[in-house]
Structure formats: C-alpha cells, structure tokens
Amino acid sequence: MEKLLALAILSFTVGFSWSRRVSVPSGTLVRVEGQALSLRCEVSDFEGPEEQDFDWKATRGAQTVNIISTWEPSFPEQALRGRVLSGDISVHRLGGSVVELRIREARVTDSATYTCSTPSTDATMRGNYDSDVQLRVIPNTLSLAPQVPVNLVTEGRSIRLHCNVSQNFTDGIYLSVTWSIKKGEVLQEDLLTFGPDMGVTVGSSFSRRYAEDEMHLHLDSEGSYSLMLSGAVPADQGMYVCTARQWTREQGDWKKIQEKTAVMGDVTVIPTAKSLTVQVLDNTILAQGDPLNLTCLVSADDLAVLGLEVTWLINATQILTHFGRDGVVTKTSNVLSMSQVGEGDFTLEIQRVELSDMGLYSCRVGAWVQHSKANWYQAAEKTSTPIQVLVTLKDPTFTVTLDSPRIAQYPGDPTELVCQVRNISHLRGERLGVSWFYSSSTNEPLAIASMDANGALMPGEKYQSSIEAGLIVVSRVEPIAFKLRLLHTTNVDAGEYACSITTWTTTHQGTWRKSSDHRSRTLKVSLPSKSPGLSVVARTVRQAISSGSTFEMSCQARPKNLKEGVALSVLISMQEGVGSPSHKLASISPDLVFKVEDQHEHSKQDSLSLVKTGREEFLFRIRGVQATDRGFYSCEVVAWIMQNGSNWVEVVKGDSNKIQLTFEHKRPIFDLSINVFTTSVLPWETVKMECIVSVLGTPTNTEDVAYEIRWYQSWGSDTVTLLASMDRWGVVKKSPRNDSSDCSLERLRAEMFVLNIHGTQESDAGEYFCTASPWMRSTTTGVWSRELDVTSKRVFLHVKFAFWDSMKFPLLYGACASLFVGLFSLILGLICAQCCLRDTTHSPRSRVKLMDLEID
C-alpha cells in the first residue's frame, strides 16, 4: 500500500510540474480606429497533436460573444459573420501552436476583453486553457497641416519648416513629429525627430549641423512644430516632408499605432556662384609715370550675407594685393594701395606706373558664407574678365639677323645658326633673351627653345628630350649674339628656322618682365646631297596551306643615298582584314635584339621567329599557324645612325607591300544528346541522366579535346536554374538547393557526363537540358582554344506522388501509440482508485479531434 501511495504522489507531482500554458500579450493594448491590428495567442507544454485549435471570444461588460475559431466554421456570432466572411476579421496560423487574430480595420466598438481558449487534448486537466487581453480602440483624431515653405532661398539664408499637428488627448497616447527631405530619386532622409518621449533624434547627415546650432526646434502649446535650418547650402535643396506618429507603451517598449505624412513643398537653394558677378572697368592707356586707378565691382543676389575676399592679379598669375574678409589688406609693393569704397566696390591704385606695370589686370573674388558663429565656407569664386593696361614708352630699336656659318653636307653632320642684334639704341638697363623656332611646309612653327633675361633655358615640348640629351645646344656667344647648334642633322631637320630677340625690364617687385619682341627673317636649312630613301619589298618564301603548317616571309630593304655606318631595324605588323587596325608582332632593333611586340602573342613566342639573313634582308617565320593567324603581313624597316657612341638616331624608314596569309580551316561539328533511363519516378528515388557529346566531321583525338558541361532545370521559357557544372579539368560546382533532394555530376567517359538526382521531390519535376563548351588543343603549338557552345534537346521529368505509401506507416504508428497510451492510462486509474478509495470522474467537453477520458 505504501508503494502505491508513493506512486500516486509522484504522478500528481509530475502533473503539476508539466502543465498547459496559454499566453496572450500582457497589459492593455491601445489601437487607432481604421488601422489594422493583430492579437497573438500561443499554447505551450501541452499533450496531443502538434497542431492545436483556438477559440477567440470578446467580452464587453456582461456580454460575451464568439468571434472566430480555427476549426469550427459556425463559431462566430451572427453579428460578426459578415466581417469574418469579408476578411475584416480573420485568424492566421503562425505555427502549430501559435495563431494571430487580425482585424483589417479596427472600430471603436471593437474595444473589449479578448479571450483566447484552447480545447483540451491532454490526458488530464492541468494548467490554464484560456487567457485574456484588454483591447482599447480610440477614435482617429490625428490631423496634420504643414505650411508651405519659401520656394526660393538664397544660399546662407534660413529655411523655416512649420508643421501643425493636432489630436484629442487620450491617456497613454504619445506623439512624435519627423521632418524629412527627398532629393530626386534618392531615398527619403530624416532631418530631426521630436518625441515620443520629449527627446530629439537627429539624422546622421545632419548631426554636425545640429551640434553647431544650425538646426533649431521651436514648439508652442497650440500643436505648432517648427524646424529652422540656418545657413542654407545647395545640398539643402529638395522636397520636404512632415510625418506625425502616435505611440503607446507595451511591455516596456514603444509601439507605433498610427502614422500620417504630408508633403510640405519643394525648396530651391540659389547658389551664390550663380548670382555672383565680378567686373573691372574699361581698358586703360597710360604714359610712364601716370597714376593708375582700377575699380572692381562685385554684385550678388544677397550680398549682405557674404564675406568677400578680393585679390588683384596681373597676367592672371601674379598677385598684386589681397583684401581679406576681416578687412586686412596684404600688399606686395609699397607703390600700390587697395581700399573698399562701398558695398561690393574695391579700388586699386598705383601712384606712378612703369613699363613693367603693363599687362592684363583682373580681380578675383571669393564669396564666403557663414555656417555657424565661428565657421565659414567658400561658396563661390570668380575672376573678372581681364582688362589691358598699356604703358607708352619708347622701346629699344635694333635689327635682328640670322646667319648659318655651318650647314651639314651629309646626314649626321652638325649645323650651326647664329642670331645677332645690330644697330641697337635706347637700351637702358634692359636685358636680351632669345627664342628659336622651326617650321616645315606642312606644319605650324614649333618652339625649339628660349632663353630668358637670366639665361635660363626653357626647351620646347617636342624638342625637350633632344636638348636634354645634348643633341641640340642653345647658347649665348656674345651679349648680343646667340647660337643654335644641331649636332647630328638628319632629313627631318630640314625646314625653315627663325629667331626672336626679346627685351626684359625690371618690375616694382624686382622681377624681370618681357617688354618687346623683335623677330628675324626665316632661314631655310636643307641637306645639299640627295635625300635619303628606303624602299622595302616583302615576298612569300613558304605559303601555309593548312592549320599547323609553317609560314615564311622575307623583307628586302633597298637604301638610297645613305652613307656607310647605318644600321637597319625591322618591325613585322599584321592586319586581320583590309581597313582593320594593325598590330605589331615582332621586331629586331638596330642592335639585332629580337622582341615579341604584342603582349597577347607571348604564348606564341616559340612559334614566332625573325632573323637577319643578309646585309639588307630579314626572314619572318610562324610555325604551326592557326585560324587566328590569317591576315595581311607587312614589314617596316628603319635606318639608324649612331650618335655620341651610344644613342641611335632615326634617319629614314620605309614600309613594304602586304602579304596575305590564308588557308582553309575546317572546324569539327559537335552535337549533344540526352539519355534518360526513366522520365517518371516516385519521390525519394534516384534519377540518372546522361549527356553524350558526339563529334561530326573532322575526327579528333580525345586527348586534344575537353568539355565544359552545365546541367539546367527549367519550368518554362523564363525560369532556368543551373544545377551543376564541370569545367574542362573535371572540377564540379553545384548550385545551392532549398529542397531535401541533392544532385551529383560525374564523367563516365571523355564524351559522357551523368547527372544523378538523389531523393527526388515534387519540385524536381520539369524540363532538363545540358550545354557543352568544347576546347580544342592545337597539335603543333599546344594552345587551347574554345569552340562554339552546343545545347541539347530538353527532356521532361515527372515525379509521381503515392498518397497511401506515404501515409500508411504514420497511421499505423499512431494507432499503436494510441492503444498503448489508453491501456496504460486505464491501469494507472485502477491503481489510484484502489489506493485512494474514492471515485474521481472528469469529463472534458467532447469535440471532433478530442479525446474522452474517464478516470475511475
């Protein structure tokens, strides 16, 4: 008897430690009329099937009405059936033990205490079978009335964003207001949010402006909310939006229950650079010693908010004086002064002008806008159109002559030209400089080099490398004479030469400035001997007749009027067709160094060769030609002479005729076929599909061909999924799958590839096809090339679903388990009845899917 009593106590203790629990949201929920709402109900620690049923009821005062059930269609009250049928009230299952009651448009009359109950599926009654939640639906009284901001705002001014928000006071309801901006297609960005807890949240892009007090929030007791943006910048341009939200506190967190948004309007910020204008008054002609007065006029749409920096320039680069935002003037000379005589009116004055003061004067203005009390940024900078200031002075007079004491007789000989000043007068403290020019019959004059007042040499762009290498020398041989020397004259140096003598005078700043320019007549330089020439003839030595054979071409140079000592270089070029661009293949330098020119041809370096076979003859060879080698080949031969013992200088060059390389190239034809052992399978079976590649036409060694294989599944013409792929090295890649089935790809032979689908599911039904990318290896060069892709026909796979085979074992296991639990419960009840000497009867309500239990 004591053992039976202990067993009963143990069963009673276990029953209380594991009991059913039905839970809904805690506290009172507040929602807004017309908004969607949902109530969640979850049951845990229960016995019976995993999918539980739920009943929802509502209690208002003493009246309780049935709302909706997950299993009984006739459960709703008559007054609510219309809303249930229309979908306004619905229950959605989130899981086997979790449901959600949803109301699409809440009504004030929906305020009530909602009860979620679950019918018993437990062997004994323990825990709770229902739970309540209080719902309060308040009227929709939130209104939003923004004021349209000023449409056009000048940069640096303020933008005022005013939004009126009103609502009826409701206990537990809080309000927040958000200002946002939308710029074109960019997503809307928040500036600032006030509330719901009286706090302020600033958008990440505006945190600096808020910290520097450039964003102000103004509130009043009438529901008026204003946001002020000071120091407007062009980035503030866009469409502004005001959003009001209602919040409530649920389980310690904020819950948004309503949101309304209104467009305030577009704001355009006019950049300062658009309205800023700078101008200097008319041109001025002065005599030496006269005073110079210039005025810089600055205007803008809102000049009062700008801080101006004004700089006077001469010849666009030299700074004369600077006027800062703080009014401090910085000067470069004591003979000039600057002042501000009015708003946007700045003057420059030079007491006595000199010849060095002549030039182009301009006024550069920087407009600054104040961000905050201590921060400024430059909004725009403009420079006026320069005006010409002329100073009349009697220039020095002289004539310039250009002579050639030495002219080259053969290519490579030196040439000397002398530029000299004669009959000079009125030269008082000035210095002389020189500039050398060259021109041909077809080109504009080019600057060779120039020498300034200090003797500094400035090479021309085209002649800089020659001057730095010492091939061209510019020097001053006397105070009034300059020399140009070409160390090695070639045919390209023939043409017309001229020199220009410039005078330099000092400025107020102690620098030298060019004051006058005198140019000489042109002098023609040409080699007295016949012009050198070079003709090149290309001919075919060996014609390639098929892919893999050898092609040979010779290049024969025929020089004319070239002295002994010249060296030849050759460059081989190729064109794919007439009119197409040519690219360089290989070359031999004057030092007989072979080089593969095209980086894409380095893979063919062993098959390309270029050798010198005679004094003026070269041989070019391609071993194992491919289809890509077909085209037109030509030679370019250049004659060179050695200078200074180490530098090669080009004398003349010539181009050959074009030789065509062509032959018939037969490509194999590839075909794909699919072999499927069965096209209709049951779930969980394995499907085997073979993709077989066949070669038509030219026979191919299997070691010289490889394939890239890809298997696809499609559900129509628009939906195609890559299942698996194998590259030509045999590496397999599979796409990720969401189903329980899996696939594998293997190669049985060189031309057979098998796709296996393991554990097929219904989602595996559909069309299957494969594609192949053949790769061919050249038998001569060993280079792999990709052929055209081929695609197989499609086959359809059908997956049959056997209902009885999938359900018979679960039904058998369930029946056995139910029989065992029933017998065990009956025996346990008899034992407890004998021990406790009392009858206990519990009859929970009987429903479909529920179990009748009786304990004696």
Image (cartoon, rainbow, N blue to C red):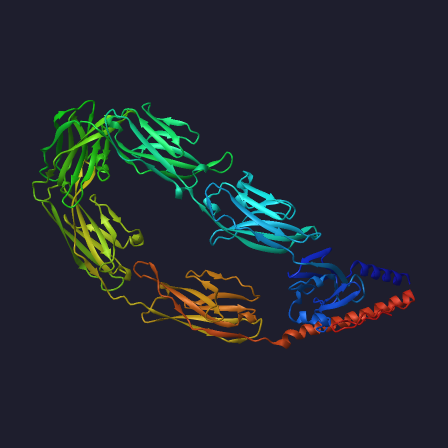
Q: Quadrant of residue 276?
A: top left
On-image quarter of the C terminus:
bottom right
The front one of 580 and 80 is 80
Q: Position of residue 772 (x, y in %)?
A: 41, 66
Q: Is residue 712 above or below residue 572?
A: below
Q: Picture coordinates of residue 392 (x, y %)? A: 21, 29
Looking at this view, is 287 or 244 the one in front? 287
In the displayed image of the protein, which residue is found farthest to the front? 342
**Residue 567 against residue 762 in the figure, above or below:** above
Quarter of the image that includes the N terminus: bottom right
Q: Count the numbered circles shown.
A: 0
Q: Nearer the viewer, residue 263 or 670?
A: 263
In this rendering, does residue 318 appear at all?
A: no
Residue 167, image x and y in percent? 65, 53
Can residue 178 be seen by looking at this rendering?
A: yes
Residue 325's quadrant in the figure?
top left
Q: As drawn, is 12 to the left or to the right of 307?
A: right
Residue 384 picture location, percent across and down:
33, 38
- Residue ranking furthest to the right: 837
Q: Is residue 658 left or right of residue 702?
A: left
Task: Tell me: residue 716, above or below residue 427.
Answer: below
Residue drawn at x 46%, y 68% is 718
Residue 339 picture quarter: top left
The correct choice, above or below, for 401 with respect to 131 in the image is: above
